[in-house]
Image (tube, grey):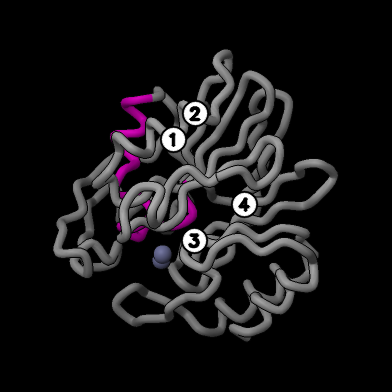
Amino acid sequence: MQITSNIFQVGGGDLTSREDAAVYLVCFGDGAALIDAGCGYRNDRLVQNVSQCLPASAKVEYLFLTHCHFDHVGGAEALRQQYGCKIVAHELDAVYLETGNSEITAALWYGEMMIPFTVDCKITTPEQTFQFGSGKVKALHCPGHSPGSLMYITESEGKTVLFGQDIHGPLNPSLLSDREDYIKSLERLMNLEADILCEGHFGIYHGMERVRKFINSFM
Ligand SMILES: [Zn+2]
Ligand SMILES: [Zn+2]
């Protein structure tokens, strides 16, 4: 599913499997990156979708994880093996991926165990920019839903595109959610004035007003 000339949704719902959060592909010339990985149940379909969107000369260099929950990360290791890409996550969530914590990663909600995997690049700062191909993606630490939740932003066709995968929450003590951090993070996202929001479970919002309205509805 094409969102802009170089951004696609390649996983989630009917594209892969019902349990998956959305998976997005960002292509910049000969470099590309995936945002989140889904549960990994239908990795075959995900890889097939990527190959339909990815230019032949382009290589997937990064897998940017928004946070540690199973519906976003279950397929991460398989994608690293498929593409040889680097897995990126915030250090505060990476610890639960690397130790295979099935409760805090919500794997138990899906009747699964979290199989530990290594995070290649752990973000330790409020923001960090990654360059690949002819473009870049910026990671922003937006805690609340999980301690190490990240939102990613990029520019496409002169528009600011925000990948805000679990803006809607939920907030749950077993996920180490924090309401005060969550509200602060939503305020930060509002100030970005994004033109397009790619959410993890609630679809894609076009237009600054619609994006603002969606974020605001959770404040
Ligand atoms: Zn989540
Ligand atoms: Zn989610």
Amino acid type of disc 4? Tyr
Say if disc 3 is inside 8 Å of ligand 2.
yes
Cα distance in 3D space between marks 4 and 2: 23 Å
- The secondary structure that dominates the magenta segment is helix
Identified at 45% across, 48% down, the residue is: 36
Q: Which residue is mark 4?
A: 152
Identified at 32% across, 59% down, the residue is: 18
Q: Quadrant of the N terminus?
A: top right
**Residue 71: quadrant of the picture:** bottom left
Q: Is label 3 in contact with label 4 (beta carbons under 8 Å)?
A: no
Q: Is label 2 in contact with label 1 (beta carbons under 8 Å)?
A: yes
Q: Which residue is mark 1?
A: 49
Earlier residue among tags 3 and 1: 1
In depth, the one of 109 and 214 nearer the eye is 214
Q: Is residue 152 above or below residue 108?
A: above
Q: Which mark is residue 52?
A: 2
Front disc: 3 or 1: 1
Cα distance in 3D space between marks 2 and 1: 5 Å
Q: Is residue 96 magenta?
A: no
Find the residue positioned furthest to the right.
Answer: 158
Earlier residue among tags 3 and 4: 4
Identified at 68% across, 51% down, the residue is: 153
Structural crowding at the residue carrying mark 3, measured as other residues with C-alpha within 10 Å and reported as few (<14), some (14–19) or many (≥20): many
Secondary element at tag 1: helix
Cα distance in 3D space between marks 3 and 4: 12 Å
